[in-house]
Image (tube, grey):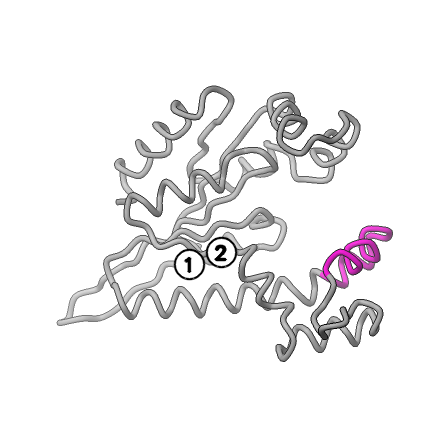
Amino acid sequence: MALFSFASNQESIFVKIICLTGGIASGKSSAAMLLESLGAKVIDADKLGHRSYQKGTLTYDKLVKAFGSKIIRSDGEIDRKILGTIVFKEKNLLRKLTDIVWPSIRLMAEREIEALKKTDKETTIVFEAAVLIEAGWETIGTETWVIEVNPEVAIKRILLRDKISQSEAQARINSQLTNRERAAKADKIITNNDSTEEFLRKVTQCWRLGAG
């Protein structure tokens, strides 16, 4: 994994970058919010993804070229829902999309990391990304934290939160990496199968044991 360092007064200063990921309903966003409250600087890959679609970006031009003008809304921006209906029909189209968007998000994340390092050389940066491992972004960080939840617990949370059917919830689980696949890339695994309070206690403990 990458380790960022700086020379200052002949001393090396290392910035810790936590790559944070987890499956649907795992609680990774709650973990990121808590870490931010504890002093971390958080970079949200999902927000970067939204920015990468905006008109005027190189990614925008590549997407329109790849998928046609039908993905453009009346205001000139990309209609993500229409694009989604196109790419999720065929795996090769989804791969075409990720081949365009994922490198753009990585570049934006690396630029934000560089900017944060310049303003605070002693900070801890958290890069939160649902598809961190699928995209190979774990190499951005100095360590990878995986939030793990049992599939049956995740399904209950999805049903309660999204008001969808059991089969739809199961399909979302099945479309992701398994807990074992994520664990193979993890430096730290934080389980979230119990109460919110217990989960946040575990995240805080991990922070205090070395991230802060």
144 vs 54, left or right, is left
The extreme left residue here reads: 9
Give me the residue at 42% from left, 58% from top: 2
Callouts 1 and 2 close, C-beta under 8 Å: yes
Q: Which amino acid does label 2 sit on?
A: Thr
Q: Observer-nearest residue: 113 or 42? A: 42
Residue range of the region highlighted in magenta in the rendering: 80-97
Nearest to the observer: residue 185 or residue 98: 98
Residue 2: assigned label: 1
Q: Identify which amino acid the numbered label 1 is placed on.
A: Ala
Image quadrant assignment for residue 62 = bottom right
Element under disc 2: helix
Q: Quadrant location of the N terminus? A: bottom left
At label 1, counting other C-alpha atoms closer than 10 Å, the crowd grade (few under 14, some 14-19, many 20 or more) is few
Q: Dominant secondary structure of the magenta stretch? A: helix
User: Left or right: where does residue 169 sit relative to residue 190?
Assistant: right
Q: In x, y percent, where is residue 211? A: 30, 44
Residue 42 is left or right of residue 118, and the answer is right
The answer to which image quadrant residue 168 occupies is top right
Residue that numbered label 2 is attached to:
139
Above or below, 137 against 159 in this view is below
